[in-house]
Image: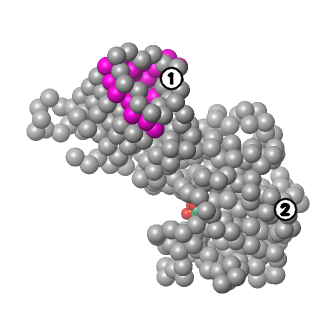
Amino acid sequence: MLSGGKGTRLRPLTFTCAKQLIPVANKPILGYVLDQIKETGITNVGVITAPETQQNVKDYVQNGSEWGFNVAYIPQKPLGLAHAVKTAQPFLTEDSFVMCLGDNVTGQGIKGFVEKFQNQNLDALIILKEVDDPTRFGIAQLDNEGTIVRLVEKPKTPMGNLAIIGTYLFSSKVHQAIEHIKPSWRGELEITDAVQEMANRGFKVKAEILNSWWLDTGKKDDILSANAKILDEYVKRNVEGEVENSAIEGRVNIAQGAKVVNSTVRGPSVIGRNAVVKDSFIGPYTSVGDNSHVIQSHLEYSVLLENVVVENVERLEDSLVGKNAKVSRNKKASTIKLHIGDFSEVNV
Ligand code: G1P
């Protein structure tokens, strides 16, 4: 399980939080990936960490007992996904393994892929999904039978639109291939090159096209769409908090200690622990983090992290608000007053 990387495209949130720990539907993305690993029956989990966010990840995963895992932490310098495999070799030994990127979630989990990999006695199984912008990903070219012809990491002139998603299954033969690849133009040992090398060596390498959604939560809009997808998929109506003079419509989860007063909350949405919603409308596809306050505001298709205050804001949409941030209306309607962190984005 990889949880390194700098998360530069998700700044400023990633100044204080590993990108894999950014919550969607009030639960870190990494948590959904760990749930999907648990479904496969795998219990030995090596977590690759980066120095900057190692503690953050450890605080969340701890000893893995929440999932029934034995967890080993494996620090790595950010030198590529194949470098991560190389670093983890003493942990992996000669075993076959699944490599998951901690910020990639799919709608179908990974159990089926593990079964296919084992039943067909493969050396590598990669999962593909059509994308709009192939230059952002590792891309696979297949022939008519679905056999891999070529794999290229972030091609400048793409030979197709099938991206390699962040779930890979390998036999120990991947280590031989990694010994023979060189760093790419971005200075990283690419897993894409390692899989190509495995194919060149005649190892049993297969690709499967994903038939559900896939989210790579690398930037703001991805977090918002991941939030929407996960709310759609997982949220059940469950009202534990206090509701007073309010309409709770559809699949809404109101956590313990939360208070909703004189408001409408429309699902799918979640309201975190000890959050307060007062005289407000919380629209569909919205997550309000623990201890956040939404007062006299209208909020839709948005994610508020913990301890956020939104006050007197007529309409906030498509927004991602970091921990302890405050968004409020200025009484002088023609003036905008800002106090925002580095790398923030404000659209007025
Ligand atoms: C990495 C892989 C790339 C893959 C992508 C999936 O990219 O190198 O092949 O398509 O993950 O998220 P990176 O996140 O390093 O840019």
> Which amino acid is tagged 2?
Gln
Label 2: few (<14), some (14–19) or many (≥20) C-alpha neighbours in 10 Å: few
* Residue 171 placement: quadrant: bottom right
Picture coordinates of residue 84, whole percent (x, y): 71, 59
Residue located 77% across and 49% down the image:
40
Which mark lies nearer to you, 2 or 1? Answer: 1
Picture coordinates of residue 36, whole percent (x, y): 69, 47
Picture coordinates of residue 284, whole percent (x, y): 39, 39
Q: Which of 195 and 208 is in front in this view?
A: 208
Task: Assign ligand 1 to one image quadrant.
Answer: bottom right
Residue at the disc numbered 1: 239
Q: Is residue 260 one of those drawn in magenta?
A: yes
Q: Is 108 placed above or below 339 here? A: below
Residue at the disc numbered 2: 118
Q: Can residue 62 be seen in this view?
A: yes
Q: Nearer the viewer, residue 270 or 95?
A: 270
Residue located 74% across and 67% down the image:
125
Q: Give the range drawn in magenta.
A: 256-278
Q: Which circle marks residue 199 in the picture?
A: none
> Which amino acid is tagged 1?
Val
Q: Is residue 258 one of those drawn in magenta?
A: yes
Secondary element type, mark 2: helix
Q: Tag 1 or tag 2, which sits nearer the N-term? A: 2
Q: Can residue 302 be seen in this view?
A: no
Residue located 25% across and 33% down the image:
313
For residue 14, side relative to residue 55 (left or right): left
